[in-house]
Image: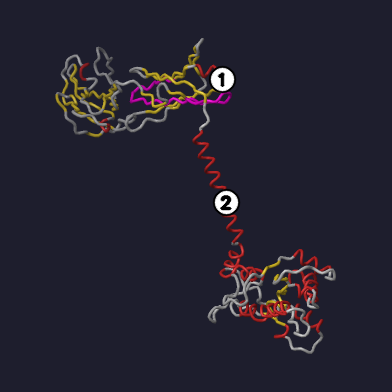
Amino acid sequence: MKLTVFVQDNCILPYGSSSLYLTTDSKGLISCPSQDCQITKNISNLKWYKSANFSSVTSPNRYSLKIINSVIHLDTIYTSDAGVYICDFDVYLNGSKWIVRANIKLEVGLPDTQKPPEILGPANETAIPAEIGKPLNLTCRIRFLYERFFNPVVKWTSIYPNYKEELSGGKELCPHATNIGERECFLTINLDKVTTNDLDAKFYCYAQNAVGNITTVVTLSLKQIDIVFLTYVLCGSVLLLMILLLGSGLVYFYWIEIVLLYRNYISKDETVGDDKDFDAFISYAPQVSELDMETKKSYCDSYDEERFAIQLLPDVLEGKYNYKLCILERDVVPGGAYVEDIANIIKRSRRAIFILSEKYIISPKVFELEAAITCSLEEQEALKLILIKFKPFKEPESLPNVVRKALSALPMVTWKGDLDSKSSGNLKFWNRIRYYMPVKKVKRNGKL
């Protein structure tokens, strides 16, 4: 193979590349960069190609464009027009045909702004609240419109009565441009400790682009206590406290009702499988005989206690709430030893209910209370005592010490109902009795 090498001279056969920048929504021309360098101008067969990849033009594609006199005419420029344009043409020099190829890289972008930057905040002549001795951050927000060669200038400057100082240490942040080429920049500087001199100074935020600049000035003012805010906080705190107190009071006042409601729907029946025969043993003062009664009143009081024990308690606790009571005269066959029968019945019961009065405290029946207390101490949680204060009473000197301690330590429910009324007493009283009774499903209309 014989290879003839010609020396390039006078801009003949240039293969160098060129570049071009056009803006969107405007018109533009693309000329072949080597076309005008030919001395003889005897070129022919000019063809255009385009490659979208700036870095690769080895396999160009034929591109349909508006070409007039070998020049590409772009009536409206779009971002998709960006790319590498390649032109090929033939040149005849000294009787030889040469093929010349050149490329031009087209970049398409937005037109540069013709406006200076805009400060979004703080507003001009703003007084910023500050506290003496406390740190303070000053942030300047600036909007920059599109510039191809973006080189913003943002700075804070403070002017005191006697000197001027450019504040440093702040970090300028300019996120990526939006789809319309805008950028919002931030510059924040920190005052470690606000002094009285700072209150007399003026702080300038300065921003500049290639078109122009803008400045905003702010001052510091002594921060005042926000009375309205404190009033709202105080009122809100008082209201919240009142709601909490009211809620706590309602829960305290209706605690027994809440527990009973919980038992009715959620709690399990604790009487199942505990090997007890009775839910409660009833102890009360017996009726005095007419021969031994001192007054008519003492007879009526004793009779009321008996009516309460053998009529009202069973009507409510057995008839309405499905409890099984043990009343000595009703449920125990006479003939056994009294002391042994009482101890045995108490051990077979889950609760022991004592109807206390002056007559009960001085009667031999107080032995049943003493026996129940002893059994409760021995069996701990197996037996619980329910004391009903049916009539006011005073503790006699002869009262056993263990009974005296139990009366002062155990909770006592006071009866305030009317036995002659059609109702069975106040609901609060019966709810407290149910609260101390074992958890048991209520039987209503033959169903649990």
- Tell me: residue 155, above or below residue 83: above
Q: Which one is nearer the viewer's eye here, 34 or 170?
A: 170
Dot 2 alpha-carbon crowd within 10 angstroms: few under 14, some 14 to 19, many 20 or more: few
Q: Is residue 310 left or right of residue 35?
A: right
- Tell me: residue 125, above or below residue 49: above
Residue underneath mark 1:
195
Q: Residue at x 77, y 85 (%)?
A: 291
- At label 2, which amino acid type do we have? Leu
As helix, strand or loop, the secondary structure at mark 2 comes to helix
Q: Is residue 134 left or right of residue 153?
A: right
Q: How far across and down, in percent of the image, does residue 121 sit?
A: 41, 26
Image color mode: secondary structure
Q: Quadrant of residue 39?
A: top left
Magenta region: which residues? 128-154
Of the numbered discs in the image, which one, if any, rests on residue 244? 2
Which is closer to the viewer, label 1 or label 2?
A: 2
Q: Earlier in the sequence, mark 1 or mark 2?
A: 1
As helix, strand or loop, the secondary structure at mark 1 comes to loop
The N terminus, quarter of image: top left
- At label 1, which amino acid type do we have? Thr
Whether residue 139 is in magenta: the answer is: yes
Q: How far across and down, in percent of the image, does residue 176 sit?
A: 40, 30
Q: Which one is nearer the viewer's eye here, 302 or 29?
A: 302
Distance CA(mark 1)–CA(mark 2): 44 Å
